[in-house]
Image (spheres, rainbow, N blue to C red):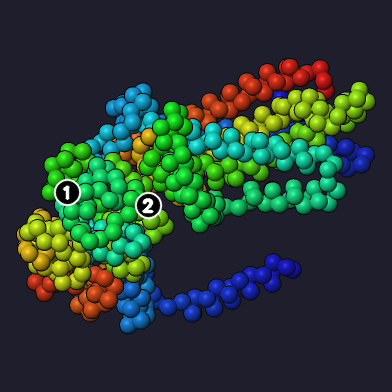
Amino acid sequence: MPVRSPETDPKTGLKDFRKGPDLFRILCGVASVATVATLVWMILEITHQSLPAIGKFGLGFLFDNRWQPNREIYGVLPFLLGTTVSSLIAILFALPLGLSVAIFLSEDFLPPTARQFIRFTIEMLAAIPSVVYGLWGIFVVVPLVKEFGMWAVKACKGVPMLGTLFGPPAYPNSILTASLVLALMILPTITAISRAALVAVPQTLREGSYALGATRWETIFSVLLPTAAPGIVAATILALGRAMGETMAVAMLIGNSPRFTGSLLSPGGTLASLLANQFGEAVGLQVASLMYAALILMALTLLVNIAGEAVLRYTQSRTAGIR
Amino acid sequence: MKTSLLTPLLAALALGSAATLPAAVQLSGAGATFPQPLYQRWASEYNKLHPDVQINYQGVGSGAGIKQFTAGTVDFAASDAAMKDEEIAAVKKGAVMIPATAGSIVIAYNLPGVKELKLSRDAYVGIFLGKITNWNDDAIKASNPGVELPDMPINVAYRSDGSGTTFVFTKYLAAISKDFADEVGSDKSVTWPVGAGGKGNDGVTALIKATAGTVGYVEYGYAVNNGLAMASLQNKAGKFIAPDEKSGAATLAGIELPENLRAWPEDPAGDDAYPIATFTWLLLYKTYDDAAKLDALKGFVKWGLTDGQKLASSLGYIPLPEAVVTKDQAALDSVK
């Protein structure tokens, strides 16, 4: 489009900017491109740094369960398992709890001021720094898990699946400890977004359901939740993404062990905590291996987001007629 | 109008602040957590004597300290593992290693009711290899007749970061046990067969204090200052020696320092020698461009090697033997 300077209207003396370049459009375009470019640059830089490790270990890196800096043997399987398991357990705790709170806040069980207060408090949870969660976990969650662990090991001794899941040795800093604190950290995300999704369900649907004779609970479970499902799925995916990348609190609570024993009560490690612990003093091949682990973490988050997008589209297509 | 008022105001502020700035020399160091309490005490005491010299030391672990030293982001570093030859070669300005203090590495435990614990060589190697998993195991009972050992699982605590403490401890265990050398090896960062990791000597201390039944390796000063119970370890001569200043000094007396001042005790043979003690080194560059920093640093290290040693024992470190101090002074003089 030819760039012309704004013409001046002879009668009023005002400049007519409509024929000139659309500065706003250009600004927005540049911002978008810059954001995407930064992400691409980050990925390229990390890949470049991890090339020595990729060259040496290839895809075996993902399946090797030995991380031995002094022998230059690196494999992230224990950390991959630790990340997945701790995030899934966090979601297991946070989703029912968050959804319950969201339902409670979207219905009129309480007066509006009380609802607002609870909403505000839960959103405050999201503002607490990760390190503070870690400290709180050390003083509050660790003793609780220690007691639970000692009881669970005795109670589940010999039981087929539970015996390995809650097997010895029971450490106070374990995958379970980290997962519990992670659950608390992702609770505000799930609650806030699910509540917004539930509130966005048109009032006509609720009224229609009551008019047909449904009780409140039937309305919630058969009408409201399925309609709000896309939003709830989005909330879960966001929460899962946050849980997988959470670093400080996990590093303080998970025990930092480079092995995955299958027991939730044993110390473990996540990809993020591995990077936090070892990057400061890593040199040479260890740096490349840590970058490779970072790349895998990014790929994992991307995979989760793609899966989330797929689920979102599926649920949206299923509930398309209702809105 | 408004800008013309602002400019003279800013200029006045700038002049005012410039006039009150002292000609301070600021030195920054990073490295081992082992000597951190001592170096930070030295820094504050030296600052009282020389208010224009401010020294900041951060305990980030020997590994991270060496990395920052190589990158040139600090003025000096500290490491319990000194530096490997490849690491020295990587430092552009050259490196001088000066043993500044020494300490014992103790095996600290948390067993309510058990005030004294003797661990034989088989016992402590077994515990850290994950072979001995309960406190009332026969191997531990055998060396502690009359002590009521609880039926509690052993929780091991180790260093999750790159640590000179780990380096010396694993070096010792690998020297006395072939199994340990094969399975774990020795380095600043190793993969321990069992246990949970804590960051820094303080992290391991916290892990030990938090749970009954935990055992871990920490530097003597941390154990003493935090009230941790320490085990008496069996040395080469078969005697069980408790860690304290005398036994540590006996260990150090047996070390012969070579030209580059880097050596570790190889399983000391003396009757009274505590098995695990190590020097910890200050790492300085061979040359410094900034003359003020050079003078301040040399003054500080010289003070540390002489007057600073008096503070060592109160904080749980072993004062350097005279012979070592002499060699250190010579090395310090070579820094220009």
Give the answer, above or below, for where A278 lies relative to B74.
above
Residues tagged by mark 1 and mark 2 found on one chain of the structure: yes
Give the answer, above or below, for where B281 lies relative to A305.
below
Q: How crowded is mark 2: few (under 14 residues within 10 Å), some or many (20 or more)?
A: many
- Picture coordinates of residue B231, whole percent (x, y): 24, 61
Give the left or right position of residue B216, taking residue B236 as reference.
Answer: right
The residue drawn where x is 50% and y is 37% is A86
What is the three-letter code of the residue carrying label 2?
Gly
Q: What secondary structure is found at the residue carrying circle 1?
A: helix
The residue drawn where x is 67% and y is 51% is A124
Out of A123 and B13, give the one closest to the viewer. A123
Residue that badge 1 annotates: B122
What is the three-letter code of the residue carrying label 1?
Asp
Name the front one of labels 1 and 2: 1
- Picture coordinates of residue A291, whole percent (x, y): 39, 36
Tell me whether circle 1 and circle 2 mark residues in contact (CB < 8 Å): no
Give the left or right position of residue B216, taking residue A219 as reference.
Answer: left
Out of A173 and B149, give the one closest to the viewer. B149
Quadrant for the N terminus of chain B in the image: bottom right
Give the answer, above or below, for where A181 lies relative to B262.
above
Quadrant for the C terminus of chain B in the image: bottom left
Between the C-alphas of marks 1 and 2, the distance is 25 Å
Residue that badge 2 annotates: B198
Who comes first in sequence, dot 1 or dot 2? 1
Q: Residues within 10 Å of mark 1 (few under 14, many from 20)?
A: some
The residue drawn where x is 49% and y is 33% is A85
Give the answer, above or below, for where B9 lies relative to A225.
below
Q: What secondary structure is found at the residue carrying circle 2?
A: strand
- Picture coordinates of residue B152, whole percent (x, y): 35, 50
